[in-house]
Image (spheres, rainbow, N blue to C red):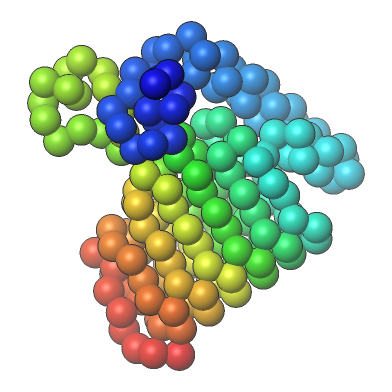
Amino acid sequence: MTEREKMLAGEPYDPRDPELVEERRRAQGAVIAFNAEPDEVRRLQVLRGLLGSFGDLSLIVPPFFCDYGTHLHLGYDSFVNTNSVFLDCAEIRVGDHARIGPGVQVLAADHPREPEQRVADFELAAPVTIGARTWIGAGAIICPGVTIGEHSIVGAGSVVVRDVPERVMAAGNPCRVIREL
C-alpha cells in the first residue's frame, strides 16, 4: 500500500511521504489564494478546484484551513463560518444544509497511542461525518472518527469525542446529549 492508501484506510502512515507532502503543498497554495481573494465568485472557483466536492449554494467564509482539500466534501447549501479548520487526512463529509459556526475544528487527524510510533512520526486518520441540517456551535472541536447525526445541534465550545445521535442537542467537554429535539 502507498502511504496515501494507508492514510485513507486508517492505518499508520508516514506524513513525510513525498506524494502526501506534494498534495499538502498544493492545498496550501489554494488555501492561501482563497483566504487572500476578496472576490466571492473567484473564492468559490478556488474551492471547487480544491475540495473533493462543494455543493451548490454552499459557502465558506475566510479564513479557512484544510490539509488536503480533496477529502473534504460539503453538501448542498452548507455554511462554514470564519476561522474553520478541517484536517482532512481522512474523508470529512458535511451534509446538506449544515451550519458550522466560527472557529470550529473538524479533525480527522489522529496519532498512535504507542509512544514508539509517535516518536517515529507515524500518524493516523479516521473519517468524520456531520449529518444534514446539523448546527455546530462556535469553537466546537469534532474529533477523529466521529459521526454527528442529522438534525442535531452541537453546542459552542463542545469537544465531540464520540458519536452524536440524530435529532439531539449535545454540548460539553466531553460532549454529551442534553436533550432530544
Q: Quadrant of the N terminus?
A: top left
Rendering coords of residue 17 (x, y %): 42, 12
| Residue at 45%, 72% in the rendered image | 149
Rendered location of residue 69, percent (x, y): 60, 36
Q: Examine the rendered structure and indicate whether residue 167 appears above or below residue 28.
A: below
**Residue at 61% across, 24% down:** 28
- How many numbered marks, from 0 up? 0
Displayed quadrant of residue 39: top right
Q: Residue at x 33, y 23 (%)?
A: 13
**What residue is at 83 percent from the left and 38 percent from the top?**
45
Residue 87 in view, yes or no: no
Toward the top, the furthest residue is 18
Image quadrant in which the C terminus is located? bottom left
Q: Quick one: 103 or 1, which is closer to the camera?
A: 1
Q: Is residue 26 visible?
A: yes
Q: Is residue 77 above or below residue 5?
A: below
> Where 120 sits versus 110, above or below?
above
**x and y percentages locating residue 7 in the rendered image:** 40, 30
Give whichever of 26, 137 is nearer the camera.
26
Outermost left residue: 115
Q: Determine the image quadrant of residue 81.
A: bottom right
